């Protein structure tokens, strides 16, 4: 085949990819627009209960009010801070615990049934105990954020530690490396991808922990706004908070994904 | 004087249901500068033997002596090269080859320069800042050789280091390893199941029988082949005669195994 024909075929191929990508975007946008416009129309026409389901226009105007008077930022900042602290500390402590288990297989075997039970138990049920123990404040919300992610992180990271190819450890040992060095040079860097991916899971878990925590104790935060809106039957406020959470949680997840792509470029 | 001495080394693995003897009564001594291959069917405990010599595994019975000193942990004068390169993918080539120096606390300016020179000699200086994933299999195994040589071991243990490579790369690498080791006067033990490779590279070939692994026979490779590079040795008329001889002995081992099984 001559070069010009090849070039033409290649161009057609690229065009087809581009076209498909554009079509996907168009349909996605259509779903988005029709969802919100139907919501608006149904609510206006009274086909759905406007008191319960509110409407996008009401939510938007409330959002603008809250954003201009600045009260939204305080709530967002609180929740955001708690969530970030929760998932970072949860991942950190979980990894530390996993390291401890890796260090002592005796300890790992002793703790195994306890970890299984703790993992199976719904951590949010511990909320009331946390509040009494730590007090109805910032601390118990963070504790909730950590608690909800720490056990699963421990289990996932510990499994990753165990699955590291024994031969890398052999290389370090053949140079006279001790257990400490094996961990630092092989186990930990090899499991970096697993730790980051558990960070991704923990973003979602931490949101659950923090929002439930705020339901229970907070005077600030998006969780507080939801529970407050519920109590005064202001569902516009509830839905607005929900949408804000959806947007921020997505951004956070994307942020961690970006971090992942930067940090583990060379892990394969 | 023998650099390495094994005195009736045996290794038995225990499990809940059984005790399996992998090696039995292995005694051998290797002089400085010698290249010895250990050849045998798969499952004859070749790699176990190498792990014991490397000090990674303490034998159930017997002793391993280096320079008349009993070893029970990895000896600084023994380098170990595995079947695959096992370069750390998250480290650059430079960081990878410095690993041994770092772990042995020998990261002096002089040693670093010597290691970089070694990388240059092997023709890979330009890959210094690359990551292993950017290199081909043969290049990676060459880097692994530099990593092993960086701590300046006197003896190298080679655990089928060419088995994961394609044939052409393997032949080239055999020449490179052989000439590099000769140049630096290193002692080496190569574990392999490739008869040709064993003949082409070594001064002595030790045949192991399997179940349990025992020294079956020791061959001296003719002087005519020893002085040649592995690739040249393969072309030499003495090569095929030696090959035939070892082949027959290996057949013998297999027959013995078979008889043991059927009896």
Image: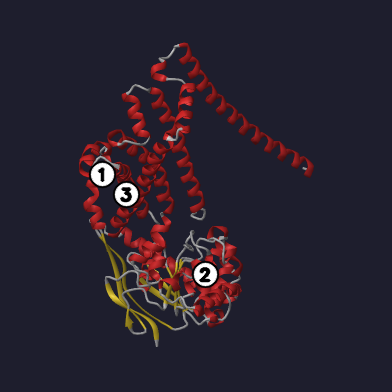
Label 3 sits on a secondary structure element that is: helix
Drawn side of residue A166 relative to residue B126, left or right: left
Please identify the quadrant where the C terminus of chain B is shown.
bottom left
- Residue A225 visible? The answer is yes
Label 1: how many Cα within 10 Å (few below 14, some 14–19, many 20+): few
Q: Residue furthest bottom?
A: B1
| Gap between marks 1 and 2 measured at Cα | 51 Å
Label 2 sits on a secondary structure element that is: helix
The residue that mark 1 highlights is A116
Label 1 sits on a secondary structure element that is: helix
Residue A251, horizontal then vertical, whole percent: 48, 39
The image quarter containing residue A26 is top right
- Residue B221 visible? The answer is no
- Which marked residue is nearer to the observer: mark 3 or mark 1? 3
Label 3: how many Cα within 10 Å (few below 14, some 14–19, many 20+): many
| Gap between marks 3 and 2 measured at Cα | 47 Å
Residue B170, horizontal then vertical, whole percent: 56, 65
Question: From what the image shows, is residue A144 above or below residue A25?
Answer: below
Using the image as rendered, state which of residue A99 and residue A212 is in the foreground.
Answer: A212
Question: From what the image shows, is residue B46 above or below residue A93?
Answer: below
**Tag 3, which chain?**
A
The residue that mark 2 highlights is B197
- Which marked residue is nearer to the observer: mark 1 or mark 2? 1
Residue B101, horizontal then vertical, whole percent: 45, 73
The image quarter containing residue A228 is top left
| Gap between marks 3 and 1 measured at Cα | 11 Å
Residue A172, horizontal then vertical, whole percent: 40, 67
The residue that mark 3 highlights is A154
Q: Reading the chain from its start, which is encountered first: label 3 or label 1?
A: 1
The image quarter containing residue A4 is top right
């Amino acid at each position: 085949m001559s070069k010009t024909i090849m070039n033409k075929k290649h161009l057609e191929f690229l065009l087809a990819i581009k076209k498909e990508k554009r079509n996907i975007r168009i349909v996605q946008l259509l779903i988005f627009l029709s969802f919100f416009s139907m919501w608006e129309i149904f609510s206006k026409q009274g086909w759905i209960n406007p008191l319960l389901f509110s409407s996008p226009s009401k939510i938007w105007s409330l959002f603008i009010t809250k954003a201009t008077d600045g009260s939204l930022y305080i709530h967002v900042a609180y929740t955001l801070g708690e969530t970030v602290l929760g998932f970072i500390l949860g991942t950190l402590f979980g990894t530390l615990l996993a390291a401890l288990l890796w260090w002592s297989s005796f300890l790992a075997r002793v703790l195994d049934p306890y970890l299984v039970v703790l993992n199976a138990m719904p951590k949010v049920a511990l909320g009331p105990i946390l509040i009494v123990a730590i007090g109805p404040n910032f601390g118990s919300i963070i504790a909730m954020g950590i608690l909800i992610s720490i056990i699963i992180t421990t289990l996932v990271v510990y499994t990753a530690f165990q699955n590291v190819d024994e031969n890398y450890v052999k290389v370090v040992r053949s140079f006279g490396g001790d257990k400490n060095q094996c961990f630092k040079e092989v186990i930990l860097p090899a499991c970096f991808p697993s730790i980051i991916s558990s960070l991704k899971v923990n973003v979602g878990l931490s949101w659950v922990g923090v929002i439930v925590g705020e339901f229970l104790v907070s005077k600030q935060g998006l969780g507080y706004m939801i529970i407050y809106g519920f109590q005064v039957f202001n569902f516009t406020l509830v839905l607005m908070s929900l949408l804000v959470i959806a947007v921020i949680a997505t951004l956070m997840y994307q942020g961690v994904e970006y971090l992942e792509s930067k940090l583990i470029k060379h892990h394969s | 004087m023998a650099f390495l001495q094994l005195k009736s080394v045996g290794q038995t693995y225990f499990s809940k249901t059984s005790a399996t003897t992998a090696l039995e009564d292995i005694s051998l001594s290797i002089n400085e500068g010698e290249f010895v291959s250990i050849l045998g069917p798969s499952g004859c405990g070749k790699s176990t033997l190498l792990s014991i010599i490397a000090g990674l595994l303490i034998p159930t019975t017997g002793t391993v002596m280096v320079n008349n000193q009993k070893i029970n942990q990895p000896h600084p004068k023994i380098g170990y090269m595995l079947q695959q390169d096992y370069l750390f993918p998250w480290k650059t080539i430079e960081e990878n080859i410095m690993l041994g120096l770092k772990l042995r606390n020998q990261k002096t300016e002089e040693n670093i320069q010597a290691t970089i020179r070694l990388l240059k000699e092997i023709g890979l200086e330009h890959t210094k800042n690359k990551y292993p994933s950017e290199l081909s299999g043969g290049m990676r195994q060459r880097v692994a050789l530099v990593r092993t040589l960086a701590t300046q071991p006197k003896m190298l243990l080679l655990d089928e280091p060419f088995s994961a490579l394609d044939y052409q790369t393997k032949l080239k690498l055999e020449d490179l390893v052989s000439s590099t080791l000769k140049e630096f006067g290193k002692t080496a033990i190569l574990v392999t199941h490739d008869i040709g490779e064993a003949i082409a590279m070594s001064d002595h070939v030790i045949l192991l029988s399997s179940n349990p692994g025992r020294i079956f026979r020791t061959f001296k490779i003719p002087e005519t082949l020893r002085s040649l590079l592995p690739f040249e040795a393969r072309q030499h008329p003495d090569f095929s005669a030696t090959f035939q001889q070892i082949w027959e002995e290996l057949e013998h081992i297999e027959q013995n195994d078979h008889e043991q099984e059927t009896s």
